[in-house]
Image: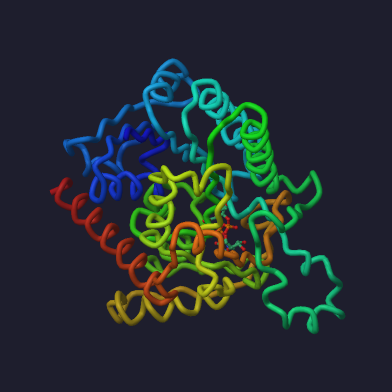
Amino acid sequence: MRVCLLGCAGFIGSHLTEWLLDNTDVDVVGTDIVDEKVRHLFGRERFTYYDSDLRHDEALTRRLVAESDVVVNLVAIASPALYTRDPLHVFELDFLENLKVVEMCSELGTRLVQFSTCEIYGKTWLSLVPGRTRSALERDRADVTMTEDETHCIVGPIDKTRWIYATSKQLLERVIHAHGQHRGLDYAIVRPFNFVGPRFDFLPSERGDDSPRLFAQFVDALIHGTELRLVDGGTARRSWTYIDDAIECVGRIVLDTTGATSREAFNVGNPDNEISVAELADLMFDVYTRRHWDGASPLPRIVSVPHEDVFGEGYDDCDRRVPDISKARRKLGWTPTTTLIELVTLTMDAFVEHYRAERARLASATT
Ligand code: UGA
């Protein structure tokens, strides 16, 4: 089997590439625009890498789609800071460019595994219920669980540009579904729920770029003793998923030849790891001070900030994201096992180790 990974050198792509090389005998062909996260795999038998931008290398993409049994499309901007800062770029890459890949797969008869997002569900219906009637309803946690083929997609008004990402991904899913129904496209859709682990995003201080997602922001603040910023008080909740668990599931979807995953969308997440942003800040603070703090460096303050200060006027938020993973359990025999404390520890350790190695490298380069 030959698997083509478009966007193989991002956080998820690099882990999937490594997993396929370590655990299977498939040939892996990957493309990306920056190779840093897969450089350690160069030279591995069965791995071919192309430095290629989907936006400019249509001929190469087409050839790879034609030559592969499965295409896994991971190319996307997935950082909320960029949804409000550059919404057209998000639409152009996440919808228009991705659409070309869908059409190629459909035309050339290649199976497509498309990465989508938990964000397509948007807000929970409960978030629209007035506060005074909410508490009784909220007792039933299952009511806000997101189920692939049942839950409605609820997003905010147009001037909340945060939703351009969710709606681009949602429309892409709808088009893929229609290609499956009317043009015979064989596909599976993956909806990730807040994966973290080694190689997640990057530290904002390292690149002078403040766009990475929450976990990287918090680690950066802990290392530098700045501020852990709780947007709007940090009441939003997320279900965190460790990358190794996630890749076990995604790998089974990619390798499926039984048809069990054909024309299905899958939530890939860990419903047991739900926590608020404020609680996560406290947990990360504790883990950092116990494992990495030298006892003297300044420690960060945990502060609440309005969303406009961090993301701008166009920001809006998903209040909760709890995945129903019964489909993945049933069809793939998959269950995530990494607990919240384990994934916080493993991911933070990887960040701190990377940070210290980079500092040592820079220090030796200047002496
Ligand atoms: C993002 C993407 O938009 C999703 O598509 C993707 O599926 C998801 O990450 C993911 O990693 O799976 P989101 O979870 O909202 O969604 O992104 P984060 O930047 O990680 O934000 C999580 C929460 O933390 C939000 O409520 C945000 O307002 C808050 N936040 C973020 C802070 O309180 N402080 C910060 O410094 C950054």
- Left or right, 297 with respect to 108, comes to left
**315 or 229: nearer the viewer:** 315
Nearer to me, 95 or 204? 95
Report the image quarter containing ligand 1: bottom right
Residue appearing at x 66%, y 47% in the figure: 166
Nearer the observer, 4 or 354: 4
Q: Which residue occupies 17% across, 36% down?
A: 45
At which x and y percent is residue 160? 75, 48
Q: Name the spot of residue 21 as percent of width and height, x first.
A: 25, 45
Residue drawn at x 42%, y 58% as measured from the top left? 246
Is 308 placed above or below 136 here? above
What x and y, as percent, mark residue 73? Answer: 47, 37
Q: Is residue 46 left or right of residue 235?
A: left
The quadrant in which the N terminus is found is top left
Say if 212 sits above or below 97 in the image. Answer: below
Figure label count: 0
Is 81 positioned to the left or the right of 41 in the image?
Answer: right
Residue located 68% across and 51% down the image: 312
Apparent side of residue 302 relative to residue 138 in the rendered image (left or right): left
Q: Which of 111 and 95 is in front in this view?
A: 111
